[in-house]
Amino acid sequence: MIKLDFEKGNGLLPVVVQDVHTKEVLMLAYMNEESLNKTIETKVATYYSRSRQALWVKGETSGHYQYVKDIRIDCDEDTILLLVEQVGAACHTGHYSCFYRNIEGEEK
């Protein structure tokens, strides 16, 4: 297994989350080593909340789980890509993707 460089991000690495079927980018989150290991073990996306300073399982409250189908890393070994089957909405606003607006604020 490849050893990711968590030190580059002060213990946290950015995670791009993508729909495994459509390839739509759903969200950006962060993982520490513990949340990555839990994600690998359970196959359910588990992130590190910077605001709460704690682990959180995506969907634990909403039921909108992300079932991990593949985990990829970038060439610098400091960014993670999760390919997931998304249940319901990825965004806390209820949108399927967090990237539902363009720079002018228009919904797409």
Image: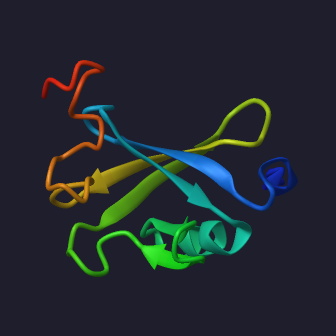
**Residue located 29% across and 72% down the image:** 59
In this rendering, the answer to whether 3 lies above or below 45 is above
**Residue located 55% across and 48% down the image:** 15
- Residue farthest toward the front in the current orientation of the protein: 104
Q: Quadrant of residue 23?
A: top left
Which one is in front, 31 or 82? Answer: 31
The image shows residue 3 at horizontal and vertical percentages of: 83, 54
**Residue located 21% across and 34% down the image:** 100
**Residue located 84% across and 47% down the image:** 8
The image shows residue 58 at horizontal and vertical percentages of: 37, 69
Residue 99 as seen in the image, left or right of residue 27 = left
Residue 16 as seen in the image, left or right of residue 75 = left
The image shows residue 77 at horizontal and vertical percentages of: 77, 41
Which one is in front, 8 or 88? Answer: 8
Which one is in front, 10 or 72? Answer: 10
Residue 70 as seen in the image, left or right of residue 11 = left
The colour scheme applied to this rendered structure is: rainbow
In this rendering, the answer to whether 20 lies above or below 2 is above
Which one is in front, 25 or 39? Answer: 25
- Residue farthest toward the top in the current orientation of the protein: 104
Give the quarter of the figure containing the N terminus.
Answer: bottom right
The image shows residue 62 at horizontal and vertical percentages of: 21, 74
Count of labels in the image = 0
Give the quarter of the figure containing the C terminus.
Answer: top left
